[in-house]
């Protein structure tokens, strides 16, 4: 068995969970699978699996090897399909992580069209405001709103969204409307960012850029929570316009301090630097970038 076939057997064992299932997937026998894995482990000088009479699990070395080899094999498969003239026949899985609110508003609506164009594609969409470890969680594509933060990542900025300071009309009827940023210290400002009780909101005035430390009775690591609180009249919030595309035209939602709010946030596609970006991921990226173009 050649080295490429050994790798395909290795991937089959990982993804099916056992030697017998891998044999069915690859059309070989269980002894042939066992021999291929043994040869691969001997050549690498490491154990890729922990074996017992009941199950087969990956070692740490096996997991790292799988994370590096899976994209390479996918790239080979993509190249073969393109060489055979089936470029549009894109199949396989892709795991995408995106912030909850942005994903619900801007990514979920285009997924049906993407699956219609690529019916053999399998999408695992993770909606979460938590920062995920791209390698450990085996994420193929991360969409970030704001700073990326991963120094070893590959980043492609695809759009930019302005910030906006907003509140519900019912809140301002009770508490008044701030006429300048410093007055926010006397208002209930809802803080996005997890355990932070205080947030520094950015503004621009005659003297240049400055920030105001704000606080309130509700903070959360979920933008959906802050958004719901603001719309319910609990307090004031700072958002990207991309997070309020439907509400900004509603008469009960009021933007404030517009002359002072000039900052923007990048919307970026991010990949792990040490992972090969497969043709499938590149095509999905291009599809989503085109779908987002002009929205902000």
Image (cartoon, helix red, strand yellow):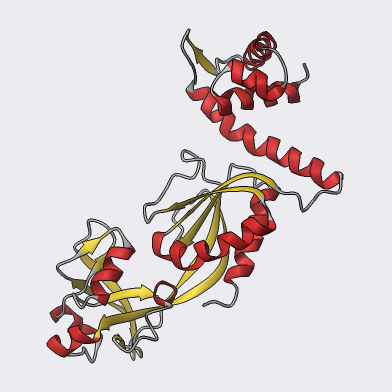
Q: Is residue 165 left or right of residue 242?
A: left
Query: Residue 169, percent across and down?
Result: 23, 87
Q: Where is 213 relative to 77, above or below?
A: below
Residue drawn 29% across and 86% down? Answer: 252
Residue 146 seen in this snapshot: no
- Residue pictured at 31% horizontal, 80% vertical: 165
Q: Nearer the viewer, residue 98 or 148?
A: 98
Residue 35 x/y as whole percent: 67, 10
> Picture quarter containing residue 258?
bottom left
Vertical comparison of 129 with 101: above or below: above
| Foreground pick, 104 / 289 | 104
Q: Tell me, yes or no, if residue 47 can be seen here.
A: yes
The number of callouts visible is 0
Can you give x and y, in whole percent of width and height, for residue 193 in the image?
A: 29, 61
Q: Is residue 113 left or right of residue 247?
A: right
Q: Is residue 6 above or below residue 181?
A: above
Residue under the image location 82 percent in, 48 percent down: 86
Which quarter shows the N terminus? top right
Question: In this image, 187 relative to 3: left or right?
Answer: left
In the displayed structure, would residue 47 be above or below residue 287? above
Q: Nearer the viewer, residue 219 or 85?
A: 85
Residue found 26% across the figure and 81% down from its top: 167
């Amino acid at each position: 068995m050649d080295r490429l076939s050994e790798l395909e057997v290795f991937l089959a064992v990982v993804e099916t969970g056992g030697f017998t299932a891998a044999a069915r997937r690859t059309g070989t026998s269980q002894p042939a699978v066992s021999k291929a894995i043994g040869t691969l482990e001997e050549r690498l000088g490491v154990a890729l699996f922990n074996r017992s009479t009941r199950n087969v699990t990956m070692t740490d070395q096996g997991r790292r090897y799988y994370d590096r080899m899976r994209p390479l094999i996918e790239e080979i498969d993509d190249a073969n399909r393109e060489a055979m003239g089936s470029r549009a026949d894109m199949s396989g899985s892709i795991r995408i992580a995106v912030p909850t609110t942005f994903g619900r508003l801007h990514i979920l609506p285009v997924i049906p069209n993407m699956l219609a164009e690529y019916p053999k594609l399998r999408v695992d969409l993770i909606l979460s405001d938590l920062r995920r470890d791209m390698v450990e969680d085996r994420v193929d594509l991360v969409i970030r709103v704001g700073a990326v933060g991963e120094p070893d990542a590959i980043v492609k900025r695809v759009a930019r969204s302005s910030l906006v300071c907003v509140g519900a009309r019912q809140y301002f009827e009770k508490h008044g409307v701030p006429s300048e940023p410093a007055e926010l210290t006397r208002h209930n400002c809802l803080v996005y960012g997890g355990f932070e009780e205080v947030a520094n909101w950015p503004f621009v005035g005659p003297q240049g850029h400055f920030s105001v430390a704000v606080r309130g009775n509700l903070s959360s690591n979920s933008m959906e929570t802050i958004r719901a609180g603001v719309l319910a009249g609990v307090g004031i919030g700072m958002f990207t316009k991309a997070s309020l595309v439907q509400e900004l035209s509603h008469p009960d939602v009021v933007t404030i301090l517009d002359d002072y709010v000039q900052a923007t946030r990048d919307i970026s596609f991010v990949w792990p630097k040490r992972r090969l970006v497969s043709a499938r991921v590149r095509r999905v990226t291009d599809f989503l970038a085109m779908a987002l173009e002009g929205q902000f």
